Amino acid sequence: MASIVVIDHPIILRIAALAVDKGASAYVVGGYVRDALMGRARSDVDITIVGDAVDFARQVANLFNSKAVVYERFGTAMVPIGDMHVEFVGTRREEYHANSRKPVVTMGTLDDDLRRRDFTVNAMAASLAPETLGHVVDLFGGQADLADGVLRTPLDPVITMSDDPLRMMRAARFAAQLGFRIDADTERAITDMADRIGIISQERITDEFLKILGAPLPSIGLKVLFQTGLLKHILPEVHALAGVDLVAVGNREYRHKDVFLHTLQVVDNVAKVSNNVWLRLATLMHDVAKPKTKRFVEGTGWTFHGHEDVGARWQEKIFRRMKLPMDHLDYVQRLVRLHQRPMMLVDEGVTDSAIRRLAVAAGEALDDLFVLCKADVTTKNPRLAERYTRNYDVVKAKVDAVAERDQLRSFQSPLRGEEIMSITGLPPSRTIGYIKWMIEEAILEGDIPNDVTAAKNYMLANVDQWVAQAETAHFQRRG
C-alpha cells in the first residue's frame, strides 16, 4: 500500500484545485515530500506539472495576485505567495543523439522527472489529484533510504553528478542538514569528479556552502567536502589546516593538534548556541593562517605568532573570490583578528585602557567575540576547560562593566571632523584626522571622559601642539 503524506496547506490545496480545473496532473515533489515523511517543518514547495509548467505557474500567479518569475533556460518558474515560494517544473525527457553535444528535450512523464533528481530521498512525489491526494510515488527506494539515513542517487552517481556538478555540494549540505551518510558509490563518484565543481558559478557554490555552515552540525558537511577533495577547490586555505605537525628533538616528539579537526569542533560548538552564519564563518576562519605562521621553537614548541592578524587580512581576498556579501567582511575580520585578545586580559593587573581598546575594537561584535572564544576551548581536560571558560566569563564581566560605564558599545569620537573644523577654523586635511585620533586616544587611556564638553576642552588645550605634530606624525588606527 502506498504511503500517504498529509497535504493540508491551504495554498497547496488551492493549487491542487486549479490543476483539476485546468486538467493538469500535478505533484508536490522533492524536499516537501521528504520532510513530510520525516515529520520536519516544511516551507517552500516544489511542484511538478505533467505538461507546460511555465503556463501553469502564470495561472497560479493570477490566482494569488502574484507574478511568476520565469527561468526560460530551464523551463521552470517560481511564484511568491505570501511568505512561501512555490517552484514549478515540467516533466521532460532529455535524449542525446549521435554527434550531438546538446540533448533533445521533449515532454516526459513523472518518471522522467523523478529519475533526473539528485538523491532518492528527494526523488519522491505526492499526488495532488483529489482521488489520490498525498499518495507517494517512490520509484527509487527513497523511503527506505530515509529510514537508513543514507544519500544515494536515483541513477548511476556519475550520471547524476555530471548532469549538475553542484549536486556534489548538495550531498555535503544534505548530509549536514539531515545527519545522513553518503553511500559509498556516490562518495566515490564525487571524489573522482571533484575538480568539475570548477564549471559551476561561484554564486551557486557559495550559496550551498553557506547552507552547510547553517546546518545543525556544520562539521558533517565540511568533513564531506574535505574527504572528497571538494574543499581544496572551494576553500584551499581551510583545506590546508588538516594534518598533524611532528618534530623530533632528541628523544622527544613534539606534536601539534590537527587544526582542521579542532576548527570543526569549534564551529560545531558555536552552532550549538548561535544560528548566525557569519559568526560561524568567522569561527571557521579564526585559525586559517596557522599553517602560514607555524614555527617550531626549541624549548618552546610550536608557535603561530600573528596568525590572527594574517588571517584577518586574508578575509578580503576570500570574500571576493567566494563572492560573499562585502557588508559582512568587517565583522568577520574583527572576530578573526581579536579572537586571541580576551585571554590576554585575564590577569588581575590588566588596565582599564586595555579593556576599553578591546571593547572599541570589537564594537557591535563584542558579544559574539566571547561566544567564539568560549567555543574555542576544546581541551579534553574538564578541569582545564572549566578554568578557561571561567576566565572568559571574568573578562567578559570586566569588559561589559567598562564599556557600559564609558559608553563604548558603539564608540566614535565625541567630535566629528566637521565640528573640529568649525571650532578650530582649520581646513579639511590629515591634521583633522590626527586631532580626532588624539581625542579618541585620550578617551581610551582614561585621560578624559567620553563626552562632548570634555573632548572640546581637551582639544582646545592641545590643538596648537597637535597641529605642529601633524605634519610629521605617523599614527596607526586601533587594531
Image: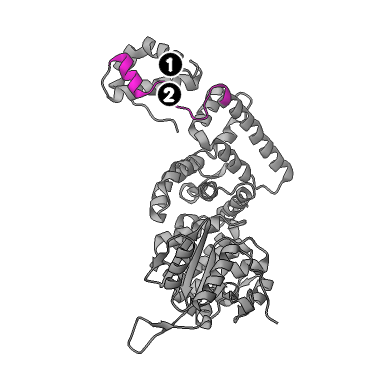
Graded by Cα atoms within 10 Å as few (under 14), some (14 to 19) or many (20 or more), the crowding at tag 1 reads many
135 w.r.t. 312: above or below: below
* Quadrant that contains the C terminus: top left
Residue furthest to the right:
383
Q: Residue at x 63, y 75 (%)?
A: 133
> In the drawing, does residue 165 fall left or right of residue 8?
left
Whether label 1 touches label 2, CB < 8 Å: yes
Say few, some or many: other residues with alpha carbon within 10 Å of mark 2 (under 14 / 14 to 19 / 20 or more).
Answer: some
Q: Tag 2: residue type? A: Ser
**Spot occupied by residue 339 in the image (x, y as percentages of width and height):** 54, 40
Q: Against 470, is 340 above or below?
A: below
What is the image's colouring?
A: one colour
In this rendering, does residue 320 appear at all?
yes
Q: Which stretch did the figure color magenta?
A: 404-425
Q: Please provide percent x and percent y for residue 122.
A: 57, 72
Percent x, y of residue 344 = 57, 33
Of residue 72 and residue 402, the one placed in the foreground of this image is 72
Q: Nearer the viewer, residue 332 or 409?
A: 409
Residue closest to the far bottom = 98
- Residue located at (63% from left, 49% from top): 269
> Taking 259 as reference, is 352 above or below it?
above
Is residue 161 covered in magenta? no
Residue 413 - label: 2
Which residue is rendered at x = 59% and y = 38% of the image? 370
What amino acid is labelled 1 in the image? Answer: Ala
* Whether residue 242 can be seen here: no
> Quarter-wise, where is residue 347 in the image?
top right
Secondary element type, mark 1: helix
Residue 421 falls within the magenta-colored stretch: yes
Q: Is residue 13 above or below residue 345?
A: below
* Residue marked by disc 1: 455
Q: Position of residue 210 (x, y in %)?
A: 50, 56
